[in-house]
Image (cartoon, helix red, strand yellow):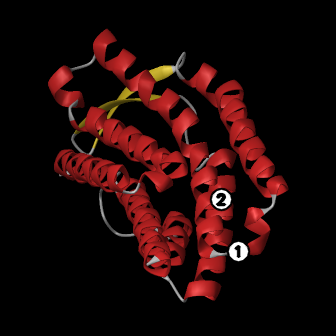
Amino acid sequence: MDVWIYSALTLVYLILVVWMAVDLTQRKQWLAYSSFQLFVAFSLAYDNGIIAVGNLIGDGEPLMVLSSLRFWLHAFATPTLILVGYHILRSSGAKFANRSITSVVAWLITLGLVIYQIVGFTLSEVKNLKVIEEYGVLRYMAEGHGGPPMMVIIVGIVLLFVSLVVLFKHKWVWLFVGTALLFVGQLISLPVETGTLTNVYELILILSIWRTTTFLMDSTDHRRR
């Protein structure tokens, strides 16, 4: 069953990438920071896609190389959600987000997390990949892999803070729901035999971030008219 879930997730992400690209080309003033969402969505499409086709490719060097790119994309793409959160803060009208120091801090945290993830995890992970088969899916995982890394936790905390600001200022709940679900989902063990739950929660988070962005874009465009 997991093969079909990963395939469906990949398809949804690809549709989302096209949707984002079309929307942002029409609102170029939002392109700078919102383009990071494109990067994250594409990296997650790749991540789920490679897992989905693992059995078709088969165990060996090609799948290992393709799988190692999953870890590199994770290291570079996921921290950029900090910049997405910063842009959402600015777009929400939070006054402190317009200060230069806030922008500097957002960029420093993002770059720091990228370096931390690469040096602390990715370099060793891609050297210690082992093939596993579970729930009908063949994929390469890093030895000792388990639980969300600190980088993901920090990104999640920042997004949770951003979601509370948006909830307070705009009564917009969906970013909070998407972020909270990612945390709560890690703590709840559901009686379902699948390895895709975290991936599903990630999709919900990305959809909630993009929907929040379009909500703020529409609100800003409406005020300019």
Q: Can you see residue 60?
A: no
Q: In the visual, does 204 lie left or right of 18?
A: right
Secondary structure beneath label 2: helix
Residue 109 is situated, as x and y percent measured from the top left of the image, at: 75, 46
SS for dot 1: loop
Residue drawn at (43%, 31%), measured in percent from left and top? 70
**Residue situated in front as seen by the camera: 135 or 184:** 184
User: What amino acid is labelled 2 in the image?
Assistant: Tyr
Residue depicted at 52% across the width and 39% down the height: 77
- Farthest residue to the right: give it: 101
| Residue labelled with disc 2 | 86
Against 1, is 131 above or below?
above
Q: Which residue is mark 1?
A: 94
The residue sitting at the front extreme is: 225
Residue 39 vs residue 111: left or right? left
Q: Which of 144/88 is in front?
A: 88
Residue 207: image quadrant is bottom left
The residue that appears at 61% across and 44% down in the rendered structure is 79
Name the side, left or right, on which 206 lies relative to 108: left
**Crowd rating for badge 1 (residues with CA inside 10 Å; few <14, some 14–19, many 20+):** some
Relative image position of residue 39 (x, y in whole percent): 44, 41
Where in the figure is residue 92, as x and y percent of width and height? 60, 74
Does label 1 or label 2 sit earlier along the sequence? 2
